[in-house]
Amino acid sequence: MHILVSLLRLAKSILMKNQIKIKNTIKPFNKDLEIEGDKSLSIRWALLASQAIGKSTSTNLLKSEDVLNTLRCLKKLGVKIRLLNRKCEINGMGINGYKYKKNITLNAGNSGTLGRLIIGLLIHSTNKIKIIGDKSLSKRDFFRITKPLEKFGAKFKSNYGKLPIIIEGTKEPKPIKYHENKGSAQCKSAIMLAALNTKGQTIIKAKKSRDHTELLFKYLDLPIKIIKKNKFDLIKINGKKNIKSFNYKIPSDISSSSFFITLTALSYNSKLKIKNVNINPSRIGIIKILKMMGVKIFFKNVKIYKGEKIADIYIQNTKYLRAINCPANLNSSAIDEFLLIFLVAAKAKGISIFKDLSELNQKESPRLKWGSKILNLMGIKTIVTNNSIKIFGNPNLNVNKKIVIKDYLKDHRVFMTSVIAALAFGGEWIIHDKDSIKTSFPSFLKIIDNIRK
């Protein structure tokens, strides 16, 4: 009996340590911040550095679980990696140069970017490789990756298009023509990386989405040609060209910065400066949308670094926010930030409408559902379908009740959005699974504590 009681106490203690309680709104602040490196660029740098010839070095690499899992997978593929305090060194093995044991298993953890992109690099592998992930990633669609990669000649066994997946590559992958119509940068990038490992020209007609991979290809002087149309890009890649080793200082992450941008916009009499942020035009949908809603945001010290646009971002609290009918053409450039945008819409005057958001439900959790649920718990009326949401804003919103957030598949963005909501709108919040931030933004709560001082 005593053992059982002790075990229950231990379980309760562990549970309490993995949750956060917030009771008070944040006080007015005026801060300067520096945010950790961009996750998308950190993962892409590591994958391409592993295909380069010689030693590549990065500084300000994001040391989140998604990025660390990327390095672990590359090590299993025979890549030598040295991770230091301020930098990471990768000794690339060249195109198709991975050397590894038979029947290895690569664990992508929670990272859709890693899980999907690394498969693109493995289409030349004739040894079977198993790809697994955590509970959340194992619920996500991988048919969007395996179907086009099968056209190159690779073979896949999967759980109805979900992880675990076993890939058996081909010695002679064939170039393909493919229409990517989902607006998924992960799908497009996986095909691009496969094309890099394939003789001949691969042609992708891709719906507009993030273009980090294209910019890295251009910076590395790889044979890529991009023809931009109104609704899609035509991407032509000639594969099998050697990649030279390269050094990269990873700029700060706009997605991580967006939590503090939103907190500032919603916090009375507050100002914020965030330094050296990646403001790639395919990633700043949240900036454009919040400006439409009346938030005061502007850039300074704009420059181009290895193809990416970098700037300092200045934000000031806005007293009056207006509802919008959000243009769907901004969706792909704000897809990871819509939970935060919904919080701003909750305080705007009028009814905000967001459409064509089915991709939100292809993330770590069904985020459209969770965005609506958080607002409902706060007292905001919503009408939600499987791809749209109407938000009935309340400029005088002030939460005066207890709210518990749990059972959300440990989606790091649900956790962090809930923290921002608690600090901005008040109430007593208990938010479970704080360890989820290790996936993408380990220092999130430390930065929150810094702002609150």
Image (cartoon, rainbow, N blue to C red):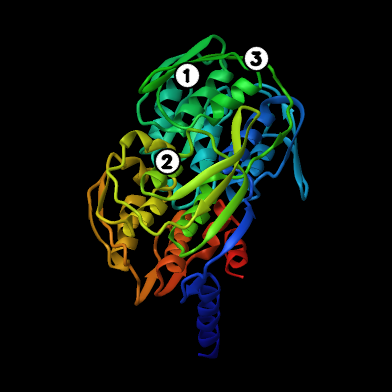
x and y percentages locating residue 314 in the rendered image: 55, 49
- Disc 1 on helix, strand or loop? loop
Q: Position of residue 274 (x, y in %)?
A: 60, 50
Name the residue located 52 percent from the left edge and 16 percent from the top edge.
173
The residue closer to the viewer here, 74 or 414, is 414
Quadrant of the snapshot with the C terminus = bottom right
Dot placed on the residue nearer the N-terminal end, 3 or 1: 1
Image point 45% across, 43% down: which residue? 287
Mark 1 or mark 2, earlier in chain: 1
Measured as percent of width and height from the top left, residue 260 is found at 52, 56
Q: Secondary structure at mark 3?
A: loop
Please give the residue where the numbered disc 2 appears in the rendered image. Answer: 288
Quickly name the residue at label 3.
241
* Three-letter code for the amino acid on which mark 2 is drawn: Lys
Rendered image quadrant of residue 143: top left
Q: Decide: is 356 above or below 269.
A: above
- Check residue 153 in the rendering and tell me which mark sits there, or answer none: 1
